[in-house]
Amino acid sequence: MQLSNWVGALRERNFSLYFLGQTTSQLGSGMAPVAVTFAVLAHGTASDVGYVAAAGLTPVVVFILVGGVLADAASRRVVMVSADALRAFAETALGLWVLLARPPLWGFMLAAALVGLGQAFFDPASTGLVPQVVSGARLQQANALNGLSNSIGGVVGPALAGVIVALWSPGYAVLIDGLTYVVSVVSLYLIRVEWRPVETSESFQARLRLGWREFWARTWLWVIVVEFSMVNVVCFASMFVLGPVVAKQSLGGAAAWGLIVAFEGAGAIVGGLVMLRFRPTRPLLVATLCPIAFAWPLIALGARSPSAVIAAGNFFAGVGIAVFSTLWATTMQREVPSEILSRVSAYDWFGSLVFLPVGMALVGPVASVVGVAPTFYGSAVVLLVLVFLTLAVPSVVQMRAPSDSGAKAG
């Protein structure tokens, strides 16, 4: 099998520019959570980590629907350039602040909020832009490559951040994250896609309502969004707020946690490579089974298992999330018309994330009452229940991929 058959999407100029920018920025984004977490823990608590995470997620929840409407009405490329410019400013400023002084908790929360605001406008526009910068026959391949860029950042970023934190200062890792957003801004600016202003007299509210109707009309879509809303609250909040605490107390600190997170990225690379060629007939059935893999690292963290055991579980979780993400994005881009895709995507993001800030803020206090181990075990049980409830929905298990590789969005 020739390599060009696996990565043919990179031969298309617009997508190769998009891929370059996103791969670079994802490297920085992989560094940032480890760096910011341990910068906060240097003088704070697990609850403070949760508050910073919640501050970053709250603007996403509040503004993502606005971002979806804007991305369907304006140039998606321009929206994304503006969003990444904001994120570059926020992370660069925070990195310098950490290096030169000791930021208060509100400083970390403010920077996280600005990054979250940029994400709220970037993500819906990105979902809509991908089908515009790659041919329809290569859409799943492009989404798999996007997942690979995220995974590469997930492998190299946390591991590099762990080394930088251990040897120097988390401020350097945050500063590098800010500079990688600059690369993304330049790459996106160089993309050339046709865009014509949407001629409509509809109000913002009317366009938002249309997006909701299209979202709600697809049972498979909102059911999986509801599932992930609960998974994020119960499982991911436990993993990424309490996980670093366990690493600091029992596993050796930042370097160990960076390695554990990096193994998830390594698994995601494997999953992304698989999805360059694997085209399941029932994509949502396969996608829905993938989150089961996250039960392993949750249980291992609760049991205070060795780092190698937790990392192995995170590897398989990474494979699962890469397969899910590719199949989910491709299915939505094929089944939802291009002119409303960003709005529908915004409802997807909103529903998936709306309760996550609450989970991030509460998981620390909850664990202090019931214990860290019971919190992890309970999260794993809830995860499995949610997956099997979703599999009971006919439109999820019966959704079939098209026999050809065409896409509705273009």
Image (cartoon, rainbow, N blue to C red):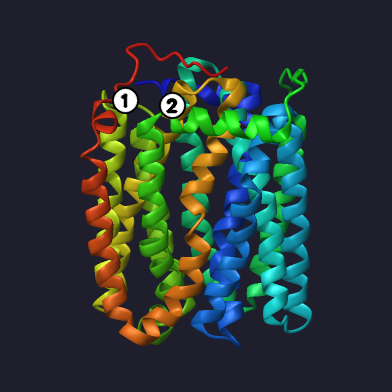
Q: On the image, which quarter does residue 278 sit in?
A: top left
**Residue 396 x/y as whole percent:** 29, 33
Query: Label 1 near label 2: C-beta < 8 Å?
Result: yes
Marked residue nearer the N-terminal end (2 or 1): 2
Q: Residue at x 61, y 60 (%)?
A: 58
Q: Report whether 203 appears left or right of 61.
A: right
Q: How many numbered markers are drawn?
A: 2
Q: Residue at x 23, y 63 (%)?
A: 381
Q: Secondary structure at mark 1?
A: loop
Seen from the viewer's position, the closer of residues 337 and 101 is: 337
Q: Residue at x 36, y 86 (%)?
A: 369
Image quarter where the C terminus lies is top right
Task: Say which residue label 1 marks.
Answer: 279
Q: Residue at x 37, y 64 (%)?
A: 234
**Label at residue 143:** none
Task: Say which residue label 2 marks.
Answer: 140
